[in-house]
Image: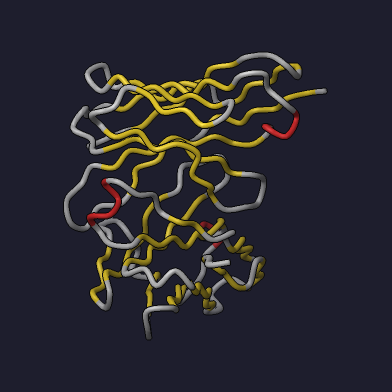
């Protein structure tokens, strides 16, 4: 089945040690999103890629970076994780930016990040 | 700035009960509103999407309504089952390039058998 895949599902890192989370999709969608969701909080958009165009949310810390080497893959890099970065990180896709007016985003299962 | 609020934060009901989850948003200029389900430690699954021109959408035992002018939506779950236990989030889409979905914090539902 076509889907959004995130690896790993659980990631433990040490304070300040760089970590990379991975997302891949078989939907051939143009847009990929990264959300951060802390416990009992709403998912918060960090950034998105529209094809190769990167769009950063204004309040996303510089500590968070992203790469999209091709249509299928997108990576979230946290350069120096702090204790406050422990969260669930959700990857999502949509066919197009305008597609959200009639269609949903498709979410992966998430990666739970623990920072020790 | 658009804010989405969901009340209650948590709800416990016995199996078979009909229930209503509430969602409110501050800016009525939305393209659509969606209800998602999130199981513990999992991603989000879209349940219903209501366009701004629509009043309600139905899928099986779920019915979602939208009153854009008052900034409110409800998700009605009929004859609840233990398998309905999950967190339900609503999200609005404002449109325009560079925007995504704005979520509420969710209502965590527990249905006991």
- The residue drawn where x is 23% and y is 35% is B30
**Front residue of B60 and A29:** B60
Residue A27 x, y percent position in the rendering: 44, 69
Q: In the displayed image of the protein, which residue is found farthest to the bottom?
A: A69
Asked which colour scheme the image uses, the reply is: secondary structure
Left of B87 or right of it: where is B7? left
Residue A100 x, y percent position in the rendering: 30, 50
- Quadrant of the snapshot with the N terminus of chain A: bottom right
Q: Is residue B82 above or below residue A37?
A: above
Residue B102 x, y percent position in the rendering: 34, 43
Q: In the displayed image of the protein, which residue is found farthest to the right?
A: B113
Q: Is residue A42 above or below residue B18?
A: below
**Front residue of A87 and B70:** B70
Q: Is residue B18 visible?
A: yes
- The residue drawn where x is 67% and y is 66% is A10
- The residue drawn where x is 72% and y is 34% is B83
Q: Is residue B104 visible?
A: no
Total marks drawn?
Answer: 0
Left of A64 or right of it: where is A101? left
When asked about the image quadrant of residue A50, the answer is: bottom left
Residue A37 x, y percent position in the rendering: 50, 51
- Quadrant of the snapshot with the C terminus of chain A: bottom right
Left of B58 or right of it: where is B98? left
């Amino acid at each position: 089945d076509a889907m959004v895949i995130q690896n790993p599902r659980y990631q433990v890192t040490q304070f300040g040690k760089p970590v990379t989370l991975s997302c891949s999709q078989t939907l051939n969608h143009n847009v990929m999103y990264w959300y951060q969701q802390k416990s009992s909080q709403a998912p918060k958009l960090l950034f998105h890629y529209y094809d190769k165009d990167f769009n950063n949310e204004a309040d996303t810390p510089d500590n968070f970076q992203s790469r999209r080497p091709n249509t299928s893959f997108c990576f979230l890099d946290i350069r120096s994780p702090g204790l406050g970065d422990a969260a669930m990180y959700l990857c999502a896709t949509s066919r197009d930016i305008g597609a959200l007016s009639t269609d949903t985003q498709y979410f992966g299962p998430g990666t739970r990040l623990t920072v020790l | 700035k658009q804010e989405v609020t969901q009340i209650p934060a948590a709800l416990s009901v016995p199996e078979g009960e009909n229930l209503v989850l509430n969602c409110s948003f501050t800016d009525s200029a939305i393209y659509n509103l969606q209800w998602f389900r999130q199981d513990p430690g999992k991603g989000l699954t879209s349940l219903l999407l209501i366009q701004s021109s629509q009043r309600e959408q139905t899928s099986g035992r779920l019915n979602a309504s939208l009153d854009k002018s008052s900034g409110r939506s409800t998700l009605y779950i009929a004859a609840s089952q233990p398998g309905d236990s999950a967190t339900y989030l609503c999200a609005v889409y404002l449109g325009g390039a560079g925007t995504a979905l704005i979520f509420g914090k969710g209502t965590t539902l527990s249905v006991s058998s």
